[in-house]
Image: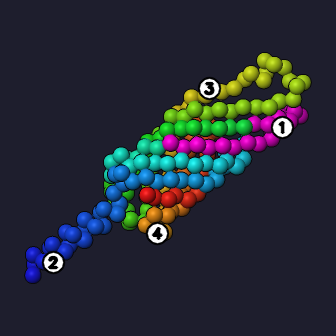
Amino acid sequence: MKKVILLVAVLFSVVIFSQRNQKGIIQVNGGIGVVPSLGILIHTGADYGITNDITGGVQLSYATSTSKSYNIEYDETWVCLGFNANYHFNNLLQLPNEFDTYAGTTLAYSSLSYNYPSTISEEFRKTTPSPIRFGLQVGGRYFFTDNIAVNAELGGGTIKGTFKTGITFRF
């Protein structure tokens, strides 16, 4: 009887652990966010489970706004294509299967463009930040089904800092 109970306990723990395993899993994310001074952003991306605790992925973000400085109104547009790597703390912290917390880094091409009135000097219009950016992020997901989660992420470095939220689908 002890052997049967031990076998059931081992099998049960393997099943529970396998739900948390991320190796080979693809997660597709999408949603909205906020960028200080730019306003609302739209984002999408995908992550692939390289190991049980490490994912690598790609993300795309877009934001646009109209700003005013020195009584001059101008448009800003930001597009960011980044590649990220995240460490997931689920196993380390022994979190319930519904939770997924992570921290990581992003290397991105970040294009910030401005549309100024023709009265602004050409030299001033050429001023743009470096397009290659390095960023850091922390975030989490809550899976309310086996394959669907809500997510939230704070990031900085790729542009002024961002807060993103949305939905994740796991395949």
Does residue 98 appear to the left or right of 5 in the view shown?
right
CA gap between label 2 and label 3 equals 61 Å
Residue 59: tell me if it is visible.
yes
Residue labelled with disc 4? 145
Is residue 2 positioned above or below 14 on the image? below
Residue 68 at what x, y percent from top left? 83, 37
Q: Which residues are magenta?
A: 58-76
Kind of residue indicated by mark 4? Thr
User: Does dot 3 land on a helix, a strand or a loop?
Assistant: loop
Q: Which mark is residue 5?
A: 2
Q: Which mark is residue 130?
A: 3
Q: Which circle's residue, 2 or 3, is located before the other in the chain? A: 2
Kind of residue indicated by mark 1? Lys
Q: Residue pushed farthest bottom? A: 1
User: Dots 4 and 2: beta carbons under 8 Å?
Assistant: no
CA gap between label 1 and label 3 equals 22 Å
